[in-house]
Image (spheres, rainbow, N blue to C red):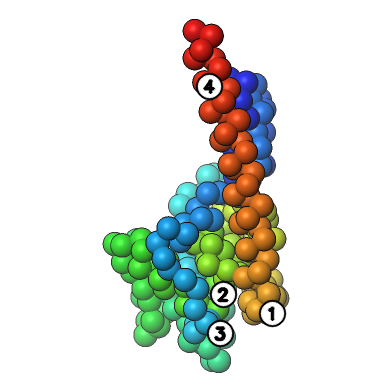
Amino acid sequence: DWSSDVCSSDLLSVEVLRRAGRSGVLLPCTSLFAVDRLKIAPANGEYIVLNYMPAGGHFLLGQPIDAEAWERRFVTLAKRLAEHDRVILVCHNQKESEAAQRILPGFEYFLSSDYRQYLRLYSRARWGMLNRVHGCFALASLGKPSAVIGSDSRAKMVRQLGLPEVFVNDANDDWLECASIELDRRAAVFPQQMDDVKLAVAMRYDSLIRGALKTTAGANEVR
């Protein structure tokens, strides 16, 4: 139905829809509900999770991204955090695993072919700092705060959860340190905040989906 609202996860997609003659409703990605049917419950935070992608993302998109600077800053961050906390490098594919072992040999890292194992790992985290946007949403689904360092507009999705994000070139040492302090501080209160957010978002999705189904059913009756 060309007249129905479409759910969008970031402002850029809303603008794209607008230019295509569609109306977009800005809502957090449905991955926010990833754990709800898997019986994976959050546990006390045992470690910090970090995720590294060379150049901060999948593609450069023609941007002058300083991949070497990001690598240096990530290594500095990981080593600083590891002085006082257990740190796990979460790798979502073989390329990330090889990169993590190359830049931080001897660090604990995690790689699995089972998405449920990632959710179980995240359930025991205290907080995280990641290049992977959906790693952030997986953590949030368990009431764990995180920050995203990204290379494209999708990173801005996490603003809807009240979480910090930054373009990879701007993720300097000061930003990373301040973000890590903020995340550590918020770890105690974030679970309740996310319960409230998830409830409100679920109700909005339910309303929009019911409305779309009603509109579609009406259109079919007319035909």
Q: Mark on residue 185?
A: 1
How far is the residue under mark 4 from the one under mark 2? Answer: 42 Å
The residue type indicated by label 3 comes to: Leu
- The label nearer to you, 4 versus 3, is 4
Looking at the image, which is closer to me, 37 or 188?
37
Residue at left offset 40%, top offset 83%: 107
- What amino acid type should be assigned to the residue bearing mark 4? Thr
Residue 215's tag is: none
Task: Name the foreground residue: 128 vs 82.
Answer: 128
Q: Which residue is mark 3?
A: 81
Quadrant into which the N terminus falls: top right
At mark 2, the secondary structure is strand
Q: Within 10 angstroms of label 4, few (less than 14), some, or many (20 or more) residues? A: some
The residue that label 4 is drawn on is 216
Point out residue 104 in the picture as x, y percentages from the top left corner: 42, 79
> Could you tell which of marks 3 and 1 lies nearer the N-terminus?
3
CA separation, marks 1 and 4? 46 Å
Q: In 3D space, how far apart are the residues under numbered discs 1 and 2 (Cα atoms)?
A: 10 Å
